[in-house]
Image (cartoon, rainbow, N blue to C red):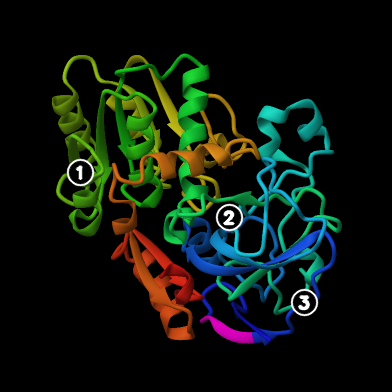
Amino acid sequence: MIRVATFAGPGTAPVIREVARPQVPKNAALIQIGACGVCGTDLHILKGHWPKPLPWPFTLGHEIAGVIVERGAELAEDFMGKPLEVGSRVMIPPLMPCGRCHYCVHYPQNANKCLTPVYYGRYLGFDKAPHLWGGWAEHVYVDLDMLPGTKIYKLPDDMPLRLGALAEPLTSCIRAFARAQRAGGFGYGDTVVIQGSGPIGILAIAAAQEMGAGRVLCVGAPEEPRLRLARRFGAEATVDIEELKTPQERIARVRELVGGFGADLVMDCSGHPSAGPEGIEFLRDGGTYVEMGQFTDAGSIETSWHRICAKDISVLGSWAFTGNDLPLGVDMLYRARDSYPFLDMQTLYPFDEDGIARAIADAMAMRTVKSTIVPCPELLQ
């Protein structure tokens, strides 16, 4: 039997259940989970913000890093052609483009908008519970014959699984900056302002520097633990929205820190509906604004900022990533693992009902930067 955490609906408490260990056919794998982050998406779902019906109850968690404990004979390599074995460290993304629909075929650069995306575990009974759908569980099951769009990515053999669990959110940041680069809105030495000091904002600070930014500033809250960590990640300065409570005060402070005409690029990672109009005033004329923090309609009815992100359109909006983007996240994490305090982002919680509930509550209250659930702590040794 395998233990999984399920939720009956928004606002409910986690319940640990047991499900039968699946048989693993020829082109499938069973992955034991070492670490799985609590994402803003998880929090939105639990707050009831998700715009579409969901098959409650089910298992949340998609920032997954684990180890293959059983695989079929035909599952020999990952999506990038790297060999897979029992014992291989891997991560799997939450949304995997099918490779066959109109968007995947005609707009591969926007395959993240796939019309028939694959979610691991759907074939185990997506409309029934419990099942091995998410990473807040001891194992996740994938079968490439039943869902050919499924993607597995091998991690370096000596990469800590805690680090691997950051690959998915970091990849979203890399893609957003790459979109700005292709649009001519982000160049070497540019000044960048990050709105939001949550996990995406912190990782965006690292990604900006790794991709050529000259100066990086961060606007967010609270000072502990988030803004202090932002500075440890390389933010030249931080602006505390709990101290400077009006947009006018924050705009003036950012302009003072940036100097000159304003920042070259502002990226919103905050998810706050008011961030867009405020962030635009951080910019110089002709600068670039990237919206990647608003992907639900949880904000004010009078704002459409979430549509910029969710539709992946120019201003620029950037939502998630494509299949070819994820290796960039894994590579950047591995290459820069000693340059940034990545593991200090994570606050670890045990895989039990109380631990999961505390991880969620602490993330919602911003007492952590990245709450991380550890189903199988022996894998982190």
Residue 16 is inside the magenta segment: yes
Q: How crowded is mark 2: few (under 14 residues within 10 Å), some or many (20 or more)?
A: many
Q: In this view, does 21 lie above or below 76?
A: below
Does label 2 or label 3 sit earlier along the sequence? 3
Horizontal and vertical percent position of residue 236: 18, 34
The quarter of the image holding the C terminus is: bottom left
- At mark 2, the secondary structure is strand
Using the image, determine if residue 83 lies above or below residue 205. Answer: below
Q: Nearer the viewer, residue 183 or 311?
A: 183
Return the mark for residue 22: 3
The residue segment tinted magenta is: 13-17
Whether residue 315 is visible, yes or no, is no
Residue at horizontal 39%, vertical 27%? 211
The mark nearer the N terminus, 3 or 1, is 3
Q: Residues within 10 Å of mark 3 (few under 14, many from 20)?
A: some
Name the kind of residue labelled 2 in the image. Answer: Met
Looking at the rendered structure, the kind of residue marked 1 is: Arg
Asked whether the residues under the numbered discs 3 and 1 touch, taking CB atoms below 8 Å apart as contact, a structural biologist would say no
The answer to the question of whether label 1 and label 2 lie on touching residues, with beta carbons closer than 8 A, is no
Q: Is mark 3 on a helix, strand or loop?
A: loop
Residue 115 picture location, percent across and down = 78, 43
Specify the quadrant that holds the N terminus: bottom right
The reply to whether residue 345 is in sight is yes
Where is residue 117 shown, x and y percent of the image?
Answer: 75, 48
Q: Which residue is drawn at 77% across and 55% down?
A: 75
Q: Camera-side residue: 42 or 33?
A: 33
Please give left or right for residue 197 compared with residue 164 in the image: left
Q: Where is mark 2, residue-wise? A: 91
| Residue 104 sits inside the magenta stretch | no
Question: Which residue is label 1 attached to?
Answer: 231
Residues under labels 1 and 2: Cα distance?
A: 28 Å
